[in-house]
Amino acid sequence: METNESKDARIYIRVGDIEIDISGEQREVDAHLMKIMEGEEWSTALTKIRSKRESAIAAAIEAAKKSGLPDRGSAFKSLIENCNIIKKPDRVLAAIHYLKDVEGVDDVPPRVIMDLFKDSGLEPPKNLSLYLNRLFEKNYLIIPKGSSNKNKHANLTLEGRAHLDKLSKK
């Protein structure tokens, strides 16, 4: 069986009217790409991509508003009201659940939780760290191994999910 020792590589990038087409041996392609990345052409391409991305996000937000989809604040408020979650620690637990499981947010520092309450028009917890500590004590929240900031990376435990389920059935 014959093997080809020289590895051919190709990179083709097209952004608007900017076209980058590099082919050859891997190390030649890498060197050429590094040179391009340092130049004006690469910066222009990245600027165009960022601009198009921001436009697409803005258009998606506008379309969601026009279609009647609830914004994050009203969706969270509906969750709280429909599940009849009254106590502040339970609302904090629900906020973490909403941010992590509905919105898919990984890092949930206290500021993000407070912003969610503000967006929803619900009264924010006055002593968030106290409520978080209570939730940890009740084993409703857990810190993943290797995480240094317990509040930022807290996840609901099975007990925490069961507690929210129980509240929603009342």
Image: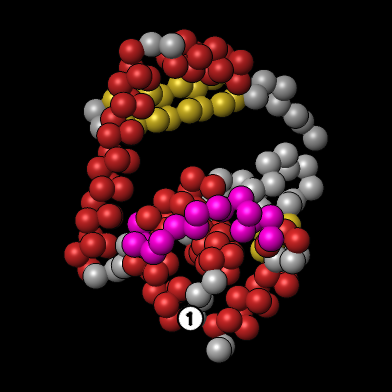
**Residue at position x 60%, y 20% in the image:** 26
Give the x, y percent position of residue 55: 25, 43
Which residue is the site of mark 1?
84
Task: Please state if 113 lies on the left or on the right of 43 as rendered.
Answer: right
* Mark 1 secondary-structure assignment: loop
Amino acid under disc 1: Asn
Residue 120: give x, y in percent of width and height: 36, 62
7 in relation to 50, above or below: above
Q: Nearer the viewer, residue 27 or 51?
A: 51
Q: Is residue 101 visible?
A: no
Crowding at dot 1, Cα within 10 Å, few <14 / some 14-19 / many 20+, comes out as some
The quarter of the picture where the N terminus appears is top right
On screen, 50 above or below 134?
A: above
Task: Estimate the x, y position of residue 101 in percent, counting from the top left.
Answer: 55, 63
Q: Which residues are magenta?
A: 119-134
Is 126 included in the stretch rendered in magenta?
Answer: yes
